[in-house]
Image (cartoon, rainbow, N blue to C red):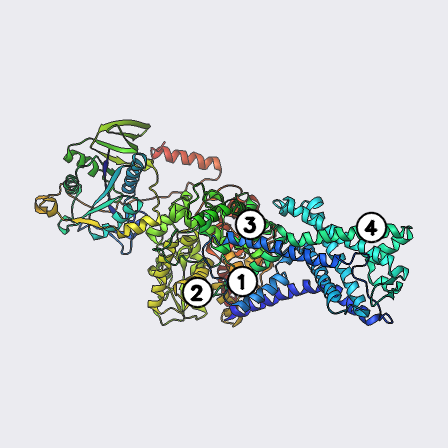
Amino acid sequence: MSLHIICCVKQVPDPETPASQFRVDEAAKKVIPAPGIAPVPSQFDTIGVEAALRIRDALGDVKITVLSLGPESFRDAIKHCLAMGADEGVLINDPALAEADHWVTAQVLAAAIQKLAPYDLVITGRQAVDWDMGVVGPTLAELLGIPCITIVKDVKVQDGKVVAERVLLDGFETVEAPLPAVVTVSNELGEPRYPQLRQIMMAARKQVTVWTAADLGLDPSQLKNRVNIEALYVPQTKVETEFIEGDTVEEKVDRLLQRLREAKLI
Amino acid sequence: MAIEVKVRSLRVRQLLTALSFFTAVALIPLVAAIAVIAASEGMGEATRQVFFNIAKWARILVYAVTAVILLVLAYGPLSRLRLWLLGKKEERWDRPWERARFFLLYGVGQGRLPNDLYAGLMHLLIFWGWTFLFIGTVMLAFHDDFVEYLEGHVYLGYSLALDLAGVAATVGILMALYRRYLWKHPKLRLGSLWDDVALLWLMLAILLTGFVIEGMRVGMTELQGATIDVHGGIASDPDWAPWSPIGFLIGKAALESGASQGFMEMLHKSLWWLHLAMATGWVAWVGYGKISHILLGSANIFLRKLSPTGAALAGTALPPIADFETAERFGAGYLRDFTWKQLMDVDVCVRCGRCEAHCPAYNTGKELTPMGFLQDIKRYLTEMGPRLLAARRKGEEVQDERPVAGDVVSFNTIWDCVTCGACEYQCPLFIEHIPKLMDMRRYLVMEQANMPETAQATLMQLEQRGHPWRGTQLTRTTWIEELAREGVEVPMFDGTQEYLYWVGCTGALQERNVKVTKAIVRLLLQSGVSFGVLGAEETCSGDPARRLGNEYLFQMQAQQNIETFKAKGVRKVIANCPHCFNTIRHEYPQLDGHFEVVHHTQLFAQLVAEGRLQPGTIEELWGFPVTYHDPCYLARHNDIVAEPRQVLQAMGLETVEMERHRKHTFCCGAGGGHMWVEESKGRRINHTRTAEAVASGARVVAVACPFCLQMFEEGAGSVPEAAKQGLQVLDVAELLERSVAYSRAASVR
């Protein structure tokens, strides 16, 4: 049985960049990264590709398509996933979609997934590591009308079903769903594999299919964001330091306890 | 520049070491021979009868046997040569005169043997003793069959010289037997194969039988004044006998103990044949066992890697992969992926254990042993090589061939190496360990993506962010902004300055190292050196990627830097990281990037010597002994040991040396990408080295490498003795800055 897995991948500004390198433009309600910050594939999304590759390692006859919505620079993220071992890459690049929120993103991705049909499994990261909203995956499932298993640490395809282990606060649960389905993966699944050089070189030569909204039969003007940012600012953290004085250790401890009780900390 | 002079004086020193050993041993018999020729008078007839007491036809037999033996001898190396040719092509014939010079220095002169005094002396005694005996035998054949010249004074000198050579060789062999059986030296861990042991006993037997034969001959002829069959019969003379001192003593003892003429004849004859059989057998053996290093080792020294940039070791500049598109395989996974010279190396190894004794990985309990992995490959080459040859002839594939990388040589062995170069520096036969290990890393990384998790994380980090410091809160310009707030303007390089100061990732992105970077910049500004920095335009030099096996990433990073350098008009570079220094100096030329590089300690030594920096005494370090830790990539890989010490001496600091220093330095544990790769097991290398620093009595460790700084800082906090002693770790530049500040304060007063 041949299987088709679609992995949705986003490119983000390097999350390891020191926070001091980002500015917030409160008027425009935008985060402005310093120039020169390397864009990288969102870590959870590459873990999604790793999950797909593990399914292929186990079953053999699996085609993996990497799907991304973003500007031309997102091609690098797709190439990275191709180098990891994915078969095909699709980039939806439309300037009209530059401001897409999760809702518009999910609608565009859903249209692309339907165009890529037949498909058996859609894998996304549990969340993108820039805004950390974690809603595109479940929204996709809703729009496609298929089951969704979120935040999993292991995913297998057995007897025409997807079997996944969900991460819970106090352990994990095993969940089954019929195919096709959406699965969002978490870092507990393991490190994404390091690409072999031959695959990097092959990936460099592979063509990435580029679509616009029109190719998907969508009219960008009809796609309205549902998320409105009311305000965007860097939270102020205030640290106050107070030294407890005293002549002896016992006296200092007593006063410290007294201060802590006053502050209702103990 | 000053660097060149340095290298030359070092070579002179090596030459002198070699010559002193050469003369000490070889000149004894020579001087003795000359003395005899000068001192002995009235013995113009003195000579000996060749083939005394032996049938005439033996002469023909000896030549016939010799011919056969030479064929047997030649077959050994030729059969191995066929196996080496399983490997890839590699050019090793360039610059023949330089090669000849190295051969004289390190082959004939044995320039690396004094590194281990006992074993060195032992080997030299055997080598020169045996060589004289061999030459003596050839001379005798020439005398007997062509021109009779061993007569009179010449003969007596000859006889004395050979006896002394025999004594020297015997002493050497006895030293070897003592070391093996009584001392049980740990370096001989792998050396107890039957052939190693049998060889020693055989050589001892050859020497002893030779002496007894001589004794019997002297006893039967010279001591009795008997007529010998020379020039139709002349009388021998008892006065000749003492010029064959050992034979004289043995012969005299035999006569005095009342041995009969018949017994002496019988003993002489039987031992003569035994001696002949053993000696010719030994010659045949030279083609095969450990003793084949006489041929293969010599060839290996001649064929050593010669660097176009003066790199000290083969592992200093790793060979590039020329074309990724056409490369059949990246790195070395199977036997045929090594070059013929790399396969030859494994056959040359005599398991002397010098590499292992100095390997930081092995000595802290890791799996890697340099001679061990060579022997593993050798064993597999012997087992699988002939089958591969046969299959290649038939155009077939061997189905059950095991990969060398990760199987014959274990995964941990390959990843334990810190590329410090101690093995290569010690090896008397110039075996090139590091490129082999790095080629296997390349295979594991680029073909198999099989590496320790920490190595993978580092390579991903390098690829995505252009520096190895994951999670740093600094950027490449943070320190420049901080200095600007102090009122220090850091010049940006724009092509008008003489030097580019290459800060390096660690110097910019690690808080502790930023202090060193700032000290260097302040010192450069004070001394008026014309320099600039690249700031955000720097990226990793490529050293970590290359030494973690990702040659592709190295070449991309190096090319990017070379393009930046060329676009900006960089000609001279100051580097404070020895790893960047080494890569820019020796590895960028492989990619057509030719820049003059100087390490900050070299430049500061020069500035101090010129009086442009005036160090004063650092009062708070009075009574604090300082030890200098040589970074591998300065000392062993680049011969830079004097300049950092000159800087420290100029400050008037009380300096002490650690046990292992200068080119014998012991790695801090961070080379070869191990700054970011977790050690597999055993004691941490940096803890071992920190303990050594403490044992030297030092209170301050002066370093000249950002990785060493990190490693010692960690060690100073974790090694209890270091914490107790309050060990401080400071870069030479930090000390110099404080020292210069004192001298300026003093001059203001």
Q: Give the structural element (helix, strand or loop) at label 4.
A: helix
Q: Nearer the viewer, mark 4 or mark 1?
A: 4
Give the Cα distance between marks 1 and 2. Answer: 17 Å
Residue type for callout 2: Ile
Q: Nearer the viewer, mark 4 or mark 3?
A: 4
- Residue B129 is situated, as x and y percent measured from the top left of the image, at 72, 59
Q: Of B410 and B219, which appears nearest the observer?
A: B219
| Callout in the foreground (2, 4) | 4
Q: Is residue B301 left or right of residue B443?
A: right
Q: Residues within 10 Å of mark 2 (few under 14, many from 20)?
A: many
Give the residue at x 19% y 51%: A71
Q: Amino acid at mark 4?
A: Leu
Residue under pointer 1: B639
Q: Which residue is mark 4?
A: B267
Q: Position of residue B143 (x, y in %)?
A: 75, 66
Q: Helix, strand or loop at disc 2?
A: strand
Query: Which of the two discs, 1 and 2, sits closer to the camera?
Result: 1
**Rendered position, B619 above or below B571:** above
